[in-house]
Image: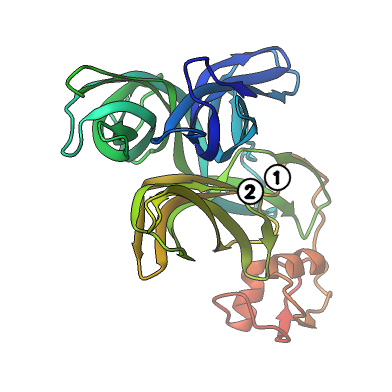
Amino acid sequence: EVRLPEDMPDIGNVLGAWGQVVVRGKEWAADTMSVSCGVMAWVLYTPEEGEGVCSIETWLPFSMKWELPDMQQEGKIQASCLLRNIDARSISNRKMMVRATISANGEAWVNGQAYTTFPGELPDDIRLLTASYPVMLPKETGEKAFVLEEQLPARNGPKLKKILHYCLQPEILEQKVMAGKVVFRGNGVLHILYEGEDGRPYCWDYDLPFSQYGDLEGEYDQDTEVSVYPCVTSLDLQTDQEGNLQLKAGVLAQYLLQARSLLTLAEDAYSPVRQLTLTREPLSLPTVLDQTTRVIHAEQSQQTDVQQVVDVSFYPDFGQTYRTEEGLQQNLPGQFQVLYYTPEGELSAMQSRWEGEWNFNTARENPVSISVMPQGKPQAVAGAGVINLRGDVAVNATVSSGNAMEMLTGLEMGEAEKPDPDRPSLILCRKGNRRMWDIAKETGSTVEKIMEANRLTEEPAEDRILLIPVV
């Protein structure tokens, strides 16, 4: 609830609310991690008596907490927040209710080691099944805090009388690893709605390019992939008598380094002439199989008589995720908010709901995490009783390994027996997707001898009749 100061006029009509998420701090405890944040919120309303537009600013604090497994070491926290929706309504002529919906994503990272085993020298009769997996493994996380401090000249248009609301959207345009550093450049999109000397609202937009680097703990080659996620930690905008602006904003760039590796594991072993006792263990790693980012264009048309568009905002949201035969379908809802003048010259606001989707091909057993972030500047074009809206949203999908990989960790060998020279060869039909490895292991043969006897260079077709030489 927000109560109006005594020097502000009574509420006539609430036009809408705008907001900026600010991440204030992160804390790691023994069994929890928490992130303290808030929403800088502005509510625009027309007064009950008089003309013009009024703006009241408020702060909506919130915190998020996640439980962690028991750990002896402290790790690093990466967090991002998405403002999904913000609205306001009047409770009385001196009080209003402001409500914001936020999604927060938190990741806890700790250093860890995983060990693989591989058999040493083995007798010639033992056959070993190995498999190689191209995986992407996390190597290092960190963050770089920096400040955007800019003197911004007034733009063309009516002179600024009062700021009504503003927001900063930092975007990363390029990121890479160079000589023990993570290097990135980006742009901060600063959007300002202000009241001019004529009492009408107007917009200014500024692009604030930045380049930064952060020191890494390890040494990595340039093929190492890095992902940088920025968030706003503070935001302050002041004006002088000439209408010029002084911006001071804190930005926290959180980064994750990942490297591609070829992981080779011993998965199985057998011998046609001796008994083997095998020990297997799962190898659990935070492996990323695939990662992709796609920009979705949100476009919407609304039947509305508009004389002039003043301001437009777009808030993407998280929707339902569905498994399909091809992989994954992600619903992508969003909401446009438009401030405009009607043909009668009245200042009004409207909200328009958008529904989109994104289809992503992946195996059904692999878990997929989805994140969405607004990108660029939304647009609104009005004409002939219709207003056309457009906003862009960047969707990132990360596919992880759904199953732990099995590896051979122990092998006990019995005494080798002499093969029976009178044992006849076999004739079998390959059914289903049985591998030649499985056929050889079950029949006491070897893959090499089966391929040689049947003149094969690859796995045989289904229902192929095979001659199985017995060792």
Q: Split into 4 quadrants, where in the image is the N terminus? A: top right
Q: From what the image shows, is residue 220 above or below residue 133?
A: above
Q: Which mark is residue 401?
A: 2
Residue picked out by circle 1 = 404
Is residue 18 visible in the rendered image? The answer is: no
Asked whether the beta carbons under mark 2 and mark 1 sit within 8 Å of each other, the answer is yes
Compute the Cα span from label 2 to label 1: 7 Å
Please give the name of the residue rendered at 34% of the width and 27% of the height, measured from the top-left corner: 163
| Residue 404 image-quadrant placement | top right
Identified by mark 1, the residue type is Ala
Q: 250 or 125, which is in the foreground?
A: 250
Left or right relative to 137: residue 460: right
Indicate the position of residue 201 as horizontal and vertical percent values: 33, 39
Q: SS of the residue at dot 2?
A: loop
Q: SS of the residue at dot 1?
A: loop
Q: Which mark is residue 469?
A: none
Is residue 122 visible in the rendered image? The answer is: yes
Q: Split into 4 quadrants, where in the image is the C terminus? A: bottom right
Q: From what the image shows, is residue 192 above or below residue 142?
A: below
Q: 419 or 285, which is in the foreground?
A: 285
Indicate the position of residue 452 as horizontal and vertical percent values: 60, 77
Indicate the position of residue 93 as horizontal and vertical percent values: 61, 29
